[in-house]
Structures are given as C-alpha cells and as structure tokens.
Amino acid sequence: MKSKFLHSNINVTDVDRSIAFYGKALGLEEVRRKRGKNFTIVFLGDGQTSHQLELTCLDEHRQPYDLGENESHIAFRVDDFDEAHALHSGMGCICYENPEMGIYFIEDPDGYWMEIIPPRPEEN
C-alpha cells in the first residue's frame, strides 16, 4: 500500500480573516471552496506543490478552539528567510524564534503555529 499527502486541516473561527492572513503571510491562495449546510471549507495552495491547507469554519463555532499545549505545527520553507522574517515581524505574528536552529514560528489569528524554515544551501 502507498499513500500520498493531500492536505492538512485546521478549524478556524473566521474563514475570510484566515484567508487574508495566509495570503499575506505565506502567499497561499484559495484553490477551491465547499459550502455545506452549516460549514465552509476552503483549500489553500502554494502554487508549487500539490499539498493544501484546508480551513474548516463551522458556522456555530465562533469561540476560540482549545489548542492544548499547541505542540503541533505546519512547516513552510521560504525562499528568502530575511524577507519573510521582516514581513512577519511587521505583521506582529512571530511568536517564537529559535536562532540556534535557524527557524522561527508565526501564529495565525486562531493561535495555530506555522514553522518558517530557510532555504537549503543548495537552493540559493
């Protein structure tokens, strides 16, 4: 048996706010949308890979989600680490920096963490 990564899901309280955040912070764009009786699902893509971020917004769930200790995250490799850091710093969304590892994390409007990784040396 083989499997293939398709998407990662997070639940959000305001889908438009989340689309705007991920568009500005990471350049993700809406790929498709599904509207159900009491939910909206939006898939975001990076235009480079087939993996997508699924945003699920339940109409009746407007309170913040309990993210526990928030030890899970989604990682993004950026092509210009300094430019990304400056953008995220200006947005005020950097929540943790690890200079020893050369990475940092940003926090989305619902409290999810995204790891920002620099390009590999051979990618420069």
Image (cartoon, helix red, strand yellow):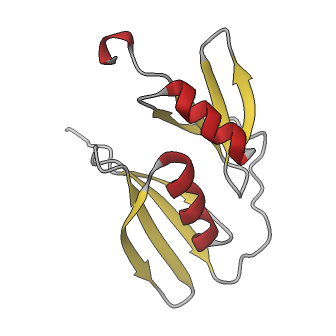
Residue 30: where, in percent of width, then height?
A: 40, 65
Q: Is residue 72 visible?
A: no
Residue sitting farthest toward the left: 1
Residue at screen point 74% across, 50% down: 67
Nearer-the-camera pick, 90 or 18: 90
Nearer-the-camera pick, 53 or 69: 53
In the rendered structure, the answer to whether residue 84 lies left or right of residue 66 reads: left
Nearer-the-camera pick, 79 or 6: 79
Residue at screen point 26% across, 43% down: 4
Residue at screen point 25% across, 42% down: 3
Instruction: From this view, report whether residue 96 is shown above or below residue 2.
Output: above
In the rendered structure, the answer to whether residue 45 lies left or right of residue 18 reads: left
Residue at screen point 58% across, 72% down: 16
Q: Quadrant of the N terminus?
A: top left
Q: How many marks?
A: 0
Residue sitting farthest toward the bottom: 37
Q: Quadrant of residue 84?
A: top right
Residue 48: where, in percent of width, then height?
A: 28, 44
Q: Quadrant of residue 21?
A: bottom right
Residue 81: where, in percent of width, then height?
A: 52, 26
Q: Quadrant of the C terminus?
A: top left
Instruction: From this view, report whether residue 123 is shown above or below residue 32.
Output: above
Q: Is residue 74 visible?
A: yes
